[in-house]
């Protein structure tokens, strides 16, 4: 049985109600974690991945109140997110996409990627770049992966994955006739029905749980 994500904070919040600050000090992993990250990067290169290491965001702290979400971020090595079971609180943003008539955008991830290779996921997602707001990451990834611009965007939740990765989840609405153009991270895409119970068999249980949470 799959281990499920843990909900840290539940919105929704409008983008202007997410307040972000960055710490000046960098997160220092242990020597063992650094060695594991090196090995993960080498494995990606051997698979032909163009992924490169660098700095990205780590979730140092968070809080809620007065209808807002507060995020304190810290620079950290990007490759730490690849450490299964101890991703060092690396932060990613996931932009789930629905059409105005309720359908869900799903894409099958390419074989060279670091996670969920060859499997179907919802929307667009990726690391929060150094100095970037995770809210900006939502719309940036949506444009980079699908060439789509949202008609509406709201921030839905902050969760922690079993790997130790933190995830900011947003929900974008696009026009019913929107025409996604996938990037090379996806080898196929589909619009899944509005009713989650009618999704195809390849829809992972965790995707169904996410969609049901967002649909409430």
Image (spheres, rainbow, N blue to C red):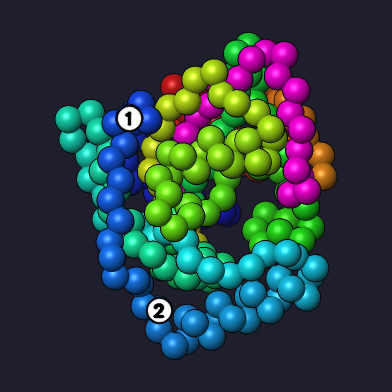
Dot 1 lies on which element? helix
| Residue 38 appears left or right of 80 | right
Q: Classify mark 1: residues with Cα within 10 Å, few (<14), some (14-19) or many (20+).
A: few
Residue at left 53%, top 68%?
54
Q: Position of residue 120 (x, y in %)?
A: 71, 43
Q: Is residue 88 visible?
A: yes
Residue at left 40%, top 54%?
131
Q: Position of residue 112 (x, y in %)?
A: 77, 61
Residue at left 50%, top 43%?
137
| Residue 118 appears left or right of 38 | right
| Residue 185 appears left or right of 86 | right
Real-space CA distance between mark 1 and mark 2, rounded to the nearest whole angstrom:
32 Å
Residue at left 72%, top 39%?
107
**Which quadrant, please, contains the N terminus?**
bottom right
Q: Quadrant of residue 205?
A: top right
Q: Position of residue 159 (x, y in %)?
A: 40, 47
Residue projecting furthest to the left: 66
- Give the magenta part as a residue range: 164-186
| Closer to viewer: mark 1 or mark 2 | 1
The number of numbered badges drawn on the structure is 2
In this figure, which residue is indicated by the disc labeled 1? 16
Asked if disc 1 and disc 2 are in contact, CB closer than 8 Å, the reply is: no
Dot 2 lies on which element? loop
Q: Is residue 12 visible?
A: no
Q: Classify mark 2: residues with Cα within 10 Å, few (<14), some (14-19) or many (20+).
A: some
| Residue 64 appears left or right of 175 | left
Residue projecting furthest to the bottom: 31
**Which quadrant, please, contains the C terminus?**
top left
Tag of residue 29? 2
User: Is residue 53 highlighted in magenta?
Assistant: no
Name the one closer to the observer, 60 or 19: 19
First in residue order: circle 1 vs circle 2: 1
């Amino acid at each position: 049985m799959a281990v499920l994500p843990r909900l840290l904070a539940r919105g929704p919040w409008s983008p202007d109600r997410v307040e972000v600050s960055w710490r000046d000090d960098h997160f220092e992993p242990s020597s063992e974690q650094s060695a594991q990250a090196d090995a993960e990067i080498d494995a990606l290169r051997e698979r032909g991945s163009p992924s490169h290491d660098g700095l990205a965001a780590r979730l140092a702290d968070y809080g809620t109140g007065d209808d807002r979400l507060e995020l304190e971020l810290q620079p950290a090595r990007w490759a730490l997110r690849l450490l299964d079971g101890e991703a060092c609180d690396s932060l990613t943003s996931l932009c789930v996409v629905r059409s105005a008539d309720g359908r869900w955008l799903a894409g099958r991830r390419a074989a060279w990627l670091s996670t969920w290779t060859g499997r179907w996921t919802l929307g667009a997602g990726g690391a929060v770049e150094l100095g970037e707001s995770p809210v900006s990451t939502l719309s940036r990834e949506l444009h980079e992966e699908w060439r789509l611009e949202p008609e509406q965007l709201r921030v839905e939740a902050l969760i922690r994955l079993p790997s130790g990765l933190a995830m900011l989840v947003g929900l974008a609405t696009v026009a019913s006739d929107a025409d996604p153009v996938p990037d090379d991270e996806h080898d196929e895409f589909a619009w899944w029905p509005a009713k989650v119970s009618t999704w195809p068999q390849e829809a992972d249980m965790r995707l169904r749980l996410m969609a049901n949470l967002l649909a409430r």
